[in-house]
Image (cartoon, rainbow, N blue to C red):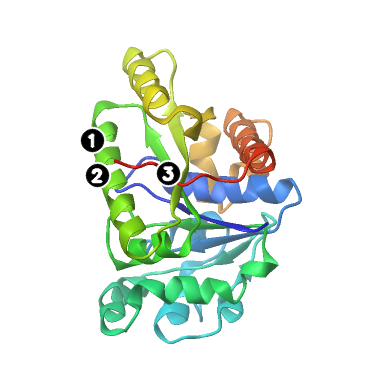
């Protein structure tokens, strides 16, 4: 069964793009077919996958706005997964999409054309609530929320849950929370442990057991246009994302997803 997940958090700097790139590579390493959709105008997931955003002739912008066939824009990476790439052109799409009927459905329709080719489709969302994010939340089955275990992260999470609830009532009633992922995790920090305990209490099994640690090699990999798995397979960051990919797949084998109870 193929699955589409939006990786999102309205708060920036939480490891959203890092998770999208490295989870894609880790799922691909387990022989799954994966498409990474870069929906952030910064194009960081594109660059981090070894694809030059400055040399793109066709991007996700063309797919969303000019109805170019999705398969024409897809690029295969050395990381073993495919990318629907993005660059600064996507900034214009935020405004241009407002002119379309059923504008929230543009990405869903685009992915429907290629969905059967992949086991997993992961969407890297911009760090804000705009029409691109709404498209991602409308197109996906579930949401993966990366977050740091700090006080302000909890405030941001509350706002995101409210957004998800609105999308459930408006364009995607089956939308659910696939999981909460703790990133940049340092168990020596007392606040980290306090916030982690609160997340566990509130989200239960939806909180991934896998935590992504602070890791130098993980931070270095994007500058080389590589997932950390290709940059340093023995690093703690690579091992953590492989563990996350395995945990996700165990969940999907064990049980079918349940809609999130948000609110």
For mark 2, give the secondary structure: helix
Residue under pointer 1:
155
> How far is disc 1 from disc 2 in space, using C-alphas?
7 Å
Q: Considering only vertical position in the picture, is 89 above or below 188?
A: below
Check the image and name the residue furthest to the right.
Answer: 31
Task: Name the residue: 69% across, 51% down.
Answer: 28
Kindly check if marks 1 and 2 are in contact, taking CB atoms under 8 A apart as contact: yes
Choose the circle earlier in sequence order: 3 or 1.
1
Task: Name the residue: 29% across, 40% down.
Answer: 263
Indicate left or right for 113 with 182 as reference: right
Task: Name the residue: 48% across, 45% down.
Answer: 18
Residue 211: percent from the left, percent from the top?
Answer: 51, 28
Q: Considering only vertical position in the picture, is 59 above or below 33?
A: below
Residue 259: percent from the left, percent from the top?
Answer: 46, 47
Numbered badge on residue 260 = 3
- Mark 3 or 2: in front is 3
Q: Mark 1 packing: few (<14 Cα in 10 Å), some, or many (20+)?
A: few
For mark 3, give the secondary structure: loop
Along the viewing direction, whichever of 205 and 12 lies nearer the viewer? 205
> How far is disc 3 from disc 1 in space, using C-alphas?
19 Å
């Amino acid at each position: 069964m193929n699955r589409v997940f939006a990786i999102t958090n309205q708060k920036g700097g939480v490891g959203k793009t890092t998770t999208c790139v490295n989870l894609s590579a880790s799922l691909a390493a387990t022989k799954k077919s994966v498409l990474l959709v870069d929906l952030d105008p910064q194009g960081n997931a594109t660059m981090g996958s070894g694809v030059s955003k400055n040399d793109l002739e066709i991007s996700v912008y063309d797919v969303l706005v000019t109805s170019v066939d999705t398969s024409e824009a897809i690029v295969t990476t050395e990381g073993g997964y495919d990318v629907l790439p993005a660059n600064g052109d996507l900034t214009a799409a935020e405004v241009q999409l407002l002119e379309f009927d059923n504008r929230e459905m543009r990405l869903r329709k685009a992915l429907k054309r290629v969905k059967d080719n992949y086991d997993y489709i992961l969407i890297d969302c911009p760090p804000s609530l705009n029409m691109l994010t709404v498209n991602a939340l409308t197109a996906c089955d579930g949401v993966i929320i990366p977050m740091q275990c700090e006080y302000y992260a909890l405030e941001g999470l509350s706002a995101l849950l409210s957004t998800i609830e609105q999308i459930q009532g408006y364009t995607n009633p089956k939308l659910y929370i696939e999981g909460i992922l703790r990133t940049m995790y340092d168990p020596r920090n007392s606040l980290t442990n306090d916030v982690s305990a609160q997340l566990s209490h509130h989200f239960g099994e939806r909180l991934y057991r896998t935590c992504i640690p602070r890791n130098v090699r993980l931070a270095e990999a994007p500058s080389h246009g590589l997932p950390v798995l290709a940059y340093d397979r023995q690093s703690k960051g690579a091992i953590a994302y492989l563990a996350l990919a395995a945990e996700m797949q165990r969940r999907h084998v064990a049980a079918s997803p349940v809609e999130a109870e948000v609110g």
